[in-house]
Image (spheres, helix red, strand yellow):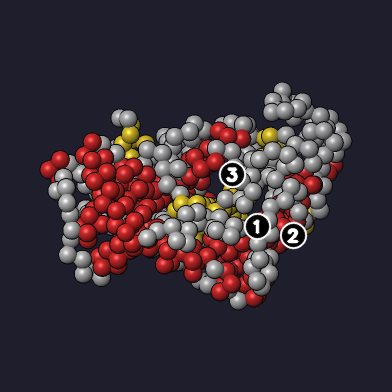
């Protein structure tokens, strides 16, 4: 199977620049000095730069068939959100509450032993014309269920957070593979030269298991890794601007000269290594982001009714993280990330990943509800409901939902039996994903879990992340079997050797 052509020309010894360059030349070649790079980029875009751009400066877009969508926003619930307490309503849990959980086979759990069937602590009711059951915390999503396709037969190949998170984020349970956003960036490139193609908005309290490895570029060219932005911080983009008085004109000139020589030597000694080129590109992008990013991240430009819809106050004040899971704070954190995601998508960012939940000890600040589902899923679920509903409604009213895919996922689900008094253990056998927008058929359900939401009803047909990723790429106009990258003698792809497009949920 052929790989995509690598359109970037690597430096060779015959390309070696002389030791001394005109300032404009080595700014373009080596990316030194953000001010000079910004000027070079602007001149290039206007066709006024005398030096030609490096080969592959603008990648060709890889499209195998007419796309239905151009952008993706992925909402990732870290810690394993409970399908049977949010989206997968099971009357049997009500009817059999307190009875021994006995599915007729040995049950393998992560931390505990099978005990009793446990009903959800939340009330449920139907929503929308499709009559979709939702629990009370995520009830705000009821306004959008007719735009959503729910997948209730998801399965994971691991019941451990780290590998399972990798699987949903990269398609593999092992480290070292590119995130889905990196693959989309590699295949389609950016729609805006002033912003990254792939942006990650983490939980303000910390990272999910594996941290930034979830959105790394792996073996793809390093420029395709996710760019992390923290809207809930007073400095959303780390080190974008130097400290006051830190850079002087003379110091910048000297630094540029040294960087030019070091970069020249480095490139000649490491032909085929994309990291230096990616670093240069990142400096160039950072220069352009100094002009574009502050405006995109300034949520005070939004009208008050939009801020209110996302659960934010008029002044967009930022609350410092606390040790407790608090409903108002959760709504603020997740809502700000969702609104920032919409603004980034609006400005041409191709793939935005929004995380909820941080792997940072006790008390829990994530969806890993071993001790108390109601304590954890109540506030987190309400924030999810408010933020995700606002995002879908906002995209729809702006005419953007038609070509934007909203993907909700988590690493696995939770068991229908109790752990301790009020918690649930890990369930890799069945959980829920949902999608909206961008060619997705709304108001439908694909796949079904059994009477307890323990395993897929049809155990011969579980749905894996490969199928969701294949569907996502298909909607973007990409054949998942043809988006490949040659690495260590293997044509690697996001879906490994698996995956089928879920045509049942396509509009």
For the point 17% across and 51% down, the residue is 20
Q: Which one is earlier in the sequence, the residue at label 1 or at label 3? A: 3
Residue 168: horizontal and vertical position, in percent? Answer: 54, 41
The residue nearer to you, when weighing 292 against 448, is 292
Residue 31 seen from this side: no
Quarter residue 272 falls in: top left
Q: Quadrant of the N terminus?
A: top left
- Residue of label 1: 333
Q: Is residue 195 above or below residue 153?
A: below
Label 1 crowding class (10 Å Cα cut-off): few <14, some 14-19, many 20+? many
What is the C-alpha distance between the residues marked 2 and 1? Answer: 9 Å
Residue 446: horizontal and vertical position, in percent? Answer: 59, 48
For the point 69% across and 25% down, the residue is 108
Which disc number belongs to residue 38?
none
Q: In the structure shown, which secondary structural element does the residue marked by tag 1 occupy?
A: helix
Label 3 crowding class (10 Å Cα cut-off): few <14, some 14-19, many 20+? some
Quarter residue 275 falls in: top left
Residues at marks 1 and 3 touching, judged by CB atoms closer than 8 Å: no
Which disc number belongs to residue 328?
2
Residue 148: horizontal and vertical position, in percent? Answer: 60, 58
For the point 26% across and 40% down, the residue is 266
- Residue of label 3: 207
Quarter residue 80 falls in: top right
């Amino acid at each position: 199977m052929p790989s995509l052509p690598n359109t970037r020309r690597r430096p060779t010894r015959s390309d070696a620049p002389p030791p001394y360059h005109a300032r404009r030349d080595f700014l373009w070649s080596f990316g030194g000095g953000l001010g000079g790079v910004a000027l070079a980029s602007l001149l290039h875009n206007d066709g006024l730069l005398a030096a030609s751009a490096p080969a592959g400066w603008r990648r060709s877009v890889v499209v195998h068939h007419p796309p239905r969508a151009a952008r993706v926003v992925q909402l990732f619930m870290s810690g394993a959100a409970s399908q049977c307490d949010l989206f997968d309503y099971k009357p049997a849990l009500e009817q059999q509450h307190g009875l021994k959980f006995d599915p007729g086979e040995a049950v393998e759990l992560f931390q505990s032993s099978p005990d009793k069937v446990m009903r959800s602590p939340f009330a449920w009711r139907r929503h929308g014309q499709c009559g979709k059951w939702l629990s009370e915390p995520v009830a705000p999503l009821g306004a959008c269920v007719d735009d959503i396709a729910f997948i209730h037969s998801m399965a994971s190949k691991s019941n451990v957070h780290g590998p399972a998170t990798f699987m949903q984020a990269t398609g593999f349970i092992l480290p070292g593979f590119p995130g889905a956003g990196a693959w989309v960036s590699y295949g389609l490139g950016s729609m805006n030269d002033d912003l990254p193609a792939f942006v990650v908005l983490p939980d303000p309290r910390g990272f999910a298991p594996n941290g930034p490895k979830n959105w790394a570029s792996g073996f793809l060219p390093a420029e395709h890794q996710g760019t992390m932005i923290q809207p809930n911080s007073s400095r959303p983009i780390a080190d974008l601007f130097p400290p006051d008085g830190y850079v002087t004109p003379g110091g910048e000139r000297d630094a540029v000269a040294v960087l030019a020589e070091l970069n020249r030597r480095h490139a000649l000694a490491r032909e085929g290594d994309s990291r230096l080129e990616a670093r240069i590109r990142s400096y160039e992008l950072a220069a352009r982001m100094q002009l574009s990013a502050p405006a995109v991240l300034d949520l005070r430009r939004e009208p008050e009714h939009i801020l209110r819809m996302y659960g934010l106050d008029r002044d967009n004040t930022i609350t410092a993280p606390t040790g407790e899971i608090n409903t108002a704070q959760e709504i603020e954190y997740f809502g700000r990330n969702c609104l920032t995601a919409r603004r980034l998508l609006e400005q041409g960012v191709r793939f935005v990943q929004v995380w909820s939940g941080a792997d940072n000890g006790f008390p829990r600040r994530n969806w890993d509800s071993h001790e108390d589902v109601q304590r954890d899923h109540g506030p987190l679920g309400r924030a999810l409901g408010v933020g995700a509903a606002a995002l879908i409604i906002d995209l729809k009213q702006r005419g953007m939902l038609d070509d934007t895919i909203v993907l909700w996922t988590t690493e696995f689900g939770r068991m229908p039996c109790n752990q301790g008094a009020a918690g649930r253990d890990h369930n890799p056998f069945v959980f829920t994903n949902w999608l909206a927008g961008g060619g997705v058929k709304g108001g439908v359900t694909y796949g079904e879990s059994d009477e307890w939401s323990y395993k897929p009803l049809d155990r011969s047909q579980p749905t894996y992340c490969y199928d969701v990723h294949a569907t996502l790429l298909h909607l973007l106009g990409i054949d998942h079997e043809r988006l490949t990258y040659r690495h260590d003698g293997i044509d690697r792809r996001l879906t490994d050797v698996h995956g089928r497009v879920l045509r049942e949920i396509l509009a």
